[in-house]
Image: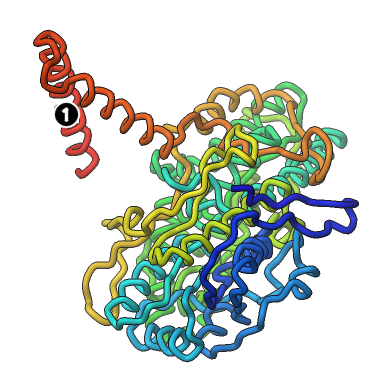
């Protein structure tokens, strides 16, 4: 079916969408909820939902204020007039996002049930990431047990790209945010190369993953990128990270280049073992103090000697940032910790030491910046407009067909035209997993809680391997790329995420190919086939099953 959004008319007006040609017969009442942080393309998810449902005179309700609005049953009727202001626009301001995390307790789920019953909802569409998908999986189970017929679906959205896996190639908003950041990084790197005297330390969003940093690096070719996954896999200490940066500064200075650009994901601090331990100890103290503000002195007194020494070795402003009041989910406010300044502080000290020993004779003038909020409300790229709109329509199809507990997804994003994209629904249970390092508990039954895992940078993936190939070349030379501002027309307007383009696998398509091959073997080996053919097929299949069994055992360890 033709379900894709197109920007029409002038670029400034960014007018209407083409509507879904497919229509549905039965009339339903559907609610849509924005969960999580702002993401470009979120409004187009609602547009895709509305345009599909309009074909059956159905009702679409938007919950104002996200999860909290759902509890309070605060709704607004989504109409063509309302949508006309928000189609192709950034942010989530049409409805507002949730300030609460997705519920995992029985009383809060009862609030959801009350809203579904009171508003006679046939379906609920949640727009969000991993925590949202996890919550919807349990909400679906709860509503079914309570005999509430409301169908729950998820649309994967979020600029950090954490809700990607074998079923989900990209989330709504990731491409746009990375393009905006790439332009800023390119501008900054070229400024440093022009002045020839500044080292740019740029921190990018990404709580404990480096998906944004990797995508931006592939688009901008900085001199160095510190991936949290790299540091974690190598168990690098703070001293080793500092030494790595100082080595590059020293090497470039030897060539007369006292400037460069370093990309840092904000979650890097959680991957450095001694800092992770320090933050864990502070988190424990914050929990015990019932979220009261703690002074650095009070915290240091209750830390282990190692952690206390590390905390007090840091600049005072970093000490204060690390002891700030935690988020509502008790986690540290990573965006408040200026990791780039922390690194600069220790790199500068290391370079001073080397200069005293005669090992370094350059100049070091760091400039630190945090690239975070500049992209979350951006106008969505054509790719995210189409992706969000198509996923909204897919979610509407899932609701119309009574498929609860599914996530809307699209495959074929890498190189196919939008008209060739394949829409699908994937059971959320297919994505749930247990993580030994971070289990969650359900308050109402005390059991281990499987969750939809966060997608981190795959250190065996094609995108990472490409980065490894280019690292030294980018480090020693000035090969900065500037992607420029978002384009809505022209040769670069239909750009795709670089990390998606680098990957060479389509999971769902490979499944189709496998099933077709197995069907062909079954047909060829029907009774009456030759003994030689049967023998060869049997031996080959048995060999394959042995390999699959071994790989399955390794994966389960």
Q: Which residue lies under the disc numbered 1?
A: 545
* Secondary structure of the residue carrying numbered label 1: helix
Given residues 429 and 266, the one toward you in this image is: 429
Mark 1 surroundings: few (<14), some (14-19) or many (≥20) residues within 10 A: few
Q: Nearer the viewer, residue 376 or 51?
A: 51
88, above or below 224, in the image: below
**Quadrant, the C terminus:** top left
**310, above or below 140, in the image:** above
Residue placed at 12% from the left, 8% from the top?
532
Residue shown at 47% from the left, 77% from the top: 122
* Residue visible at 43% across and 70% down in the picture: 152
**Above-or-below relation of 516 to 387:** above
- Residue 446 image-quadrant placement: bottom left
Left or right of 183: which side holds 139? left
Residue 102 at x, y = what percent?
45, 74
Seen in the image, is 362 located left or right of residue 540? right
């Amino acid at each position: 079916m033709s379900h894709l959004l197109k920007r029409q008319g002038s670029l400034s007006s960014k007018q209407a969408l083409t509507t879904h040609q497919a229509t549905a017969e039965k009339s339903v009442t559907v609610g849509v909820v924005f969960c999580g942080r702002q993401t470009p393309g979120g409004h187009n998810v609602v547009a895709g939902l509305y345009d599909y449902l309009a074909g059956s005179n159905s009702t679409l309700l938007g919950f104002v204020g996200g999860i909290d609005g759902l509890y309070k049953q605060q709704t607004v009727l989504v109409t063509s007039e309302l949508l006309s202001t928000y189609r192709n626009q950034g942010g989530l301001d049409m409805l507002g996002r949730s300030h609460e995390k997705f519920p995992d307790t029985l009383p809060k789920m009862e609030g959801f049930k009350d809203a579904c019953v009171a508003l006679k909802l046939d379906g609920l569409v949640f727009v969000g990431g991993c925590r949202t998908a996890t919550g919807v999986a349990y909400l679906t189970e709860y509503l079914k047990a309570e005999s509430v017929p409301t169908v729950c679906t998820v649309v994967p959205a979020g600029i950090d790209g954490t809700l990607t896996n074998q079923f989900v190639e990209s989330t709504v908003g990731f491409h746009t945010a990375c393009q905006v950041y790439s332009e800023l990084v390119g501008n900054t790197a070229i400024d440093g190369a022009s002045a020839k005297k500044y080292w740019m330390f740029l921190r990018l969003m990404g709580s404990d993953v480096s998906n944004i940093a990797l995508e931006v690096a592939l688009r901008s070719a900085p001199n160095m990128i510190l991936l949290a996954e790299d540091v974690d896999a190598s168990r690098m200490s703070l001293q080793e990270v500092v030494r790595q940066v100082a080595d590059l500064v020293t090497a470039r200075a030897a060539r007369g280049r006292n400037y460069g650009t370093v990309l840092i994901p904000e979650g890097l601090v959680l991957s450095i073992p001694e800092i992770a331990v320090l933050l864990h100890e502070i988190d424990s103290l914050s929990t015990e103090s019932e979220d009261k503000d703690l002074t650095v002195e009070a915290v240091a007194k209750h830390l282990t000697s190692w952690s206390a020494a590390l905390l007090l070795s840091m600049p005072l402003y970093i000490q204060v940032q690390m002891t700030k009041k935690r988020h509502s989910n008790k986690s540290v406010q990573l965006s408040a910790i200026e990791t780039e300044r922390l690194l600069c502080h220790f790199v500068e000290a290391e370079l001073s030491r080397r200069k005293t020993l005669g090992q370094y004779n350059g100049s070091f003038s760091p400039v630190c910046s945090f690239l975070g909020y500049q992209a979350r409300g951006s106008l969505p790229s054509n790719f995210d407009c189409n992706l969000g709109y198509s996923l909204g329509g897919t979610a509407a199809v899932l609701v119309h067909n009574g498929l609860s507990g599914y996530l809307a997804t699209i495959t074929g994003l890498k190189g196919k035209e939008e008209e060739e994209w394949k829409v699908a629904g994937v059971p959320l249970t297919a994505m749930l997993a247990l993580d030994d390092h971070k289990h969650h508990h359900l308050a109402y039954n005390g059991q281990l809680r499987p969750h939809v895992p966060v997608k981190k940078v795959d250190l065996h993936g094609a995108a990472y391997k490409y980065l490894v190939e280019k690292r030294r070349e980018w480090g020693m030379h000035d090969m900065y790329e500037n992607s420029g501002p978002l384009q809505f027309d022209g040769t670069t307007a239909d750009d795709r995420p670089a990390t998606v383009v680098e990957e060479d696998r389509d999971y769902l398509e490979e499944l189709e190919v496998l099933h077709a091959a197995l069907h062909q073997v079954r047909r060829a080996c029907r009774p009456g086939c030759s003994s030689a053919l049967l023998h060869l097929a049997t031996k080959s299949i048995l060999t394959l099953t042995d390999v699959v069994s071994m790989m399955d055992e390794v994966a389960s360890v």
